[in-house]
Amino acid sequence: MRAADAAAAAAVGAAWAVGAAALGVELPLIQAGMGGIAGPALAAAVSDAGALGTVALYKSDRALAAALVEQTAARTTRTFGVNVIPEVADRQLDQQLDAVLAKADRQLTVNSYGLPPQSFADRVRAAGHRLLIQTGSHRDARTAAALGAHAVTVQGTEAGGHHLGGQPLAELLAELRADPALDLPVFAAGAVGTGADLLRVLAAGAHGAMCGTLFVATAESAAHPDYRCDLVAATPADTVVTDRFSIGWPGRTHRVLRSAVTDAPAPLPSALIAWTTVMGTRRPVPRGSAAAPTTEAEGRVGEMARYAGLGVGAVTGVEPAAAVLARLREQYARALADAGVPDGAGVPSGVQASAGAR
């Protein structure tokens, strides 16, 4: 192996180690906190498999947020993440954090989609938890660092779900890598679905990745069965960035699977298309709602917001999260070998271990 190749392999291994340490896990990969989809079962399964599982609080009130944290903790002995969305939670945000701090029985990662208030960041840090802030621009990543984030996620437009910015991932990573003042772990979000994808973002300057689409079709996900099947059948060309699902979460474009709603030349007429359950109450779903189709949904699920990123091609079946992560570890090791790294050089400890190893 050439000296340059050896140095590159060492750099990637070091980046992996930094990312894993920043999260308190073996595998520097974060399961995204997808509202309605990422419940305790999925979060615990991902954490048990060595990555960082995340339970989504979305619009939960204090009681539900407390229950979600408690239920996740009861399912795994490992650390996990709790996702909040300040711009959606609004006045519930402080109550959600109250619940997290009251029910946390170990160090957690509080994952904020977008920049949280300074008071929120201060409370997370004062309680001894990790603060991860998701951003969509170089400027916001620097602001996140100033807020006291322990790590940041940068999201490219390749990602499924709502977008925090308008740049592709490679461009964002290049900007952050060139900024010597941004001295904290960076996780990449957008079209990371395989071990080769993980190697690619590590080589581009990230310390790990955040994946959402990859976990929606898992056995532990709370996604509607039709949504899972649609992801299995989809290719990247079946996704589109749109603004058609803005009811309940306005102001952000989002990448979803194509449907009659997205492909119509003009927005379709307002109509009730489904019913779902929110915090124990049965509620109607209007066309254009930001709500993703969960197992509770009944109706025209194909017209709901089926979030999906360009990594959807890596979703090949409905299977346990542990199997997904075991394959990703194997793919990563194989990608290193394909790059000319012999005899496991540059492969961090545990990459090829079984997903259930402790």
Image (cartoon, rainbow, N blue to C red):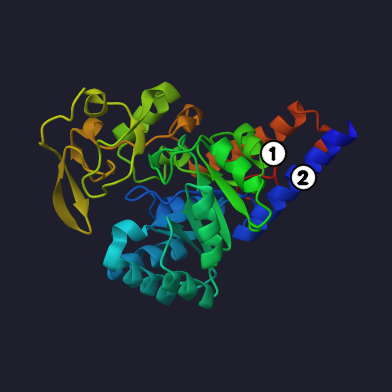
Image coordinates of residue 177 in percent, x first then y, are 66, 46
Image coordinates of residue 114 in percent, x first then y, are 42, 55
Q: Quadrant of the rendered structure where residue 174 is? A: top right
SS of the residue under disc 2: helix
Is the residue under label 2 in contact with that under label 1 (CB below 8 Å)?
yes
SS of the residue under disc 1: helix
The number of callouts visible is 2
Residue at 43 percent across and 44 percent down: it is 165
Residue at 69 percent across and 48 percent down: it is 16
Residue at 54 percent across and 65 percent down: it is 146
Residue 217 or residue 158, whichever sits in front: 158
Image coordinates of residue 209 in percent, x first then y, are 57, 45
Kindly identify which numbered label has been placed on residue 203.
1
Query: Type of residue at label 2?
Result: Ala
Kindly identify which numbered label has been placed on residue 11.
2
Question: Where is 104 relative to 295, above or below?
Answer: below
Query: Type of residue at label 1?
Result: Ala
Q: Quadrant of the C terminus?
A: bottom right
Kindly identify which numbered label has been placed on residue 157.
none
Give the CA distance from mark 1 to mark 2: 8 Å
Q: Report whether 167 appears left or right of 209.
A: left
